[in-house]
Image: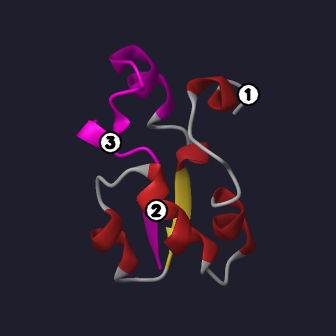
């Protein structure tokens, strides 16, 4: 098992809709992490949320699968985390 950042540690092109300040605020929170089986983490590194959703949805882990239920990753949704 590995931990995958939903929002990558380094802000990639797929995450430009998130301000630098909001990225710094939310990237290190536990709510930004999901468990993945080994091997999937490197395939998803730096990808956008829409690319990550199908992999999260296939997980056997309930909490990881729940991450795929979000329509999008918007700061307004993360403020309560």
Q: Tell me what residue is drawn at x 38 percent, y 77 percent.
A: 40
Left or right of 23: which side holds 26? right
Q: Earlier in the sequence, mark 3 or mark 2?
A: 3
- How far apart are labels 3 and 2 at the CA level? 11 Å
List the residue tagged with mark 2. 52
| Secondary structure type for disc 2 | helix
Q: How busy is the neighbourhood of tag 1: few (under 14 within 10 Å), some, or many (20 plus)?
A: few
Residue 74 appears at what percent x and percent y?
A: 57, 31
Q: Quadrant of residue 38?
A: bottom left
Q: Quadrant of the C terminus?
A: top right
**Contact, CB < 8 Å: mark 3 with mark 2?**
no
Q: Give the image quarter of residue 51.
A: bottom left
Residue 53 in sight from this viewpoint:
yes
> Measuring 66% from the left and 84% from the top, which residue is drawn there?
60
- Between disc 1 and disc 3, the foreground one is 3
Residue furthest top as drawn = 21
The image's mark for residue 35 is: none
Dot 3 surroundings within 10 Å: few (below 14), some, or many (20 or more)? Answer: some
Q: What segment is highlighted magenta in the picture?
A: 1-26
Callout 1: SS:
loop
Dot 2: within a 10 Å radius of its alpha carbon, few (fewer than 14), some, or many (20 or more) residues? Answer: many
Residue 27, position as x, y percentages in the image: 44, 36
Q: Is residue 77 above or below residue 39?
A: above
State whether residue 71 is above or below residue 2: above
Find disc 1 in the rendering and name its residue.
80
Q: Which residue is mark 3?
A: 14
């Amino acid at each position: 098992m590995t931990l995958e950042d939903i929002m990558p540690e380094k802000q990639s092109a797929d995450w430009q809709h998130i301000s630098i300040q909001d990225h710094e605020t939310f990237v290190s929170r536990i709510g930004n992490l999901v468990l993945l089986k080994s091997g999937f983490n490197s395939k998803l590194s730096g990808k956008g949320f829409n690319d990550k959703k199908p992999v999260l949805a296939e997980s056997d882990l309930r909490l990881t699968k729940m991450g795929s239920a979000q329509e999008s990753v918007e700061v307004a949704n993360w403020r309560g985390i």
